[in-house]
């Protein structure tokens, strides 16, 4: 598994913490980034509001993926349905179509605990 690019992500609908190895030769997982999605605002048109929400979600997911180039394994965890939406987004993204993804549910934890949690998954 030495050439595997493994990442872990804790996420909810507006925040993501990305854990991975700095480079392929690194021994330990480290915190790579925190990503904060923008809040959606109410709109008088339901269609416009839905389109805006989809655009904001897509932008949030793309920002997360910029930190996980050439990922072979990704473990997603967090609260709610965000991980499931993100897994579908990965499956629909050609670059990540063959990436092995797993998910679990967990509450928000400190960065150090998250690093331990993700390291235990690999």
Image (cartoon, helix red, strand yellow):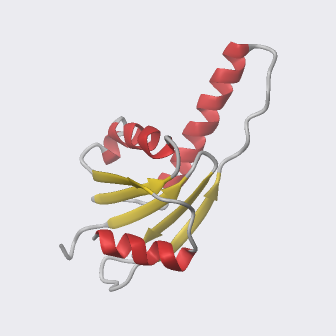
Query: Height in image: 27 above or below 87?
Result: below
Q: Residue at x 34, y 58 (%)?
A: 74
For the question of whether residue 70 can be seen, the reply is no
Residue in view at x 65 percent, y 30 percent: 53
The C terminus, quarter of image: bottom left
Q: Residue at x 51, y 71 (%)?
A: 32
Please state which of residues 77 and 93 is positioned toward the viewer in this rendering: 77
Is 40 displayed left or right of 35 in the figure?
Answer: right
Question: Total marks drawn?
Answer: 0
Q: Residue at x 64, y 23 (%)?
A: 51
**Residue 27, x across and y down, in percent:** 32, 86
Whole-percent x, y for residue 113 in the image: 50, 77
Q: Is residue 46 visible?
A: yes
| Residue with the most extreme bottom position | 27
Left or right, residue 37 beside residue 93: right
Residue 75's x, y, as percent? 36, 59
Judging depth in this view, the residue of 25 and 41 nearest the camera is 41
The picture quadrant where one finds residue 25 is bottom left
In the rendered view of the protein, which quadrant contains the N terminus? bottom left
Q: Residue 70 appears at what percent x and percent y?
A: 33, 59
Q: Which sits in the foreground, 114 or 73? A: 114
Asked if 45 appears above or below 100 in the picture, the reply is above
Look at the picture and state if 30 lies above or below 9.
below
């Amino acid at each position: 598994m030495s050439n595997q690019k493994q990442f872990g992500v804790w996420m909810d609908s507006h925040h993501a913490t990305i854990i991975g190895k700095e480079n392929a030769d690194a021994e330990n997982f480290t915190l790579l980034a925190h990503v904060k999605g923008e809040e959606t605002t109410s709109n008088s048109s339901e269609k416009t509001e839905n389109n805006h929400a989809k655009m904001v979600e897509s932008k949030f997911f793309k920002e997360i993926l910029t930190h996980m180039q050439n990922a072979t394994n990704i473990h997603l965890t967090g609260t709610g349905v965000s991980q499931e939406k993100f897994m579908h987004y990965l499956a629909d993204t050609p670059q990540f179509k063959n990436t092995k993804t797993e998910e679990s549910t967990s509450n928000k934890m400190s960065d150090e605990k998250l690093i331990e949690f993700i390291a235990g998954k690999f």
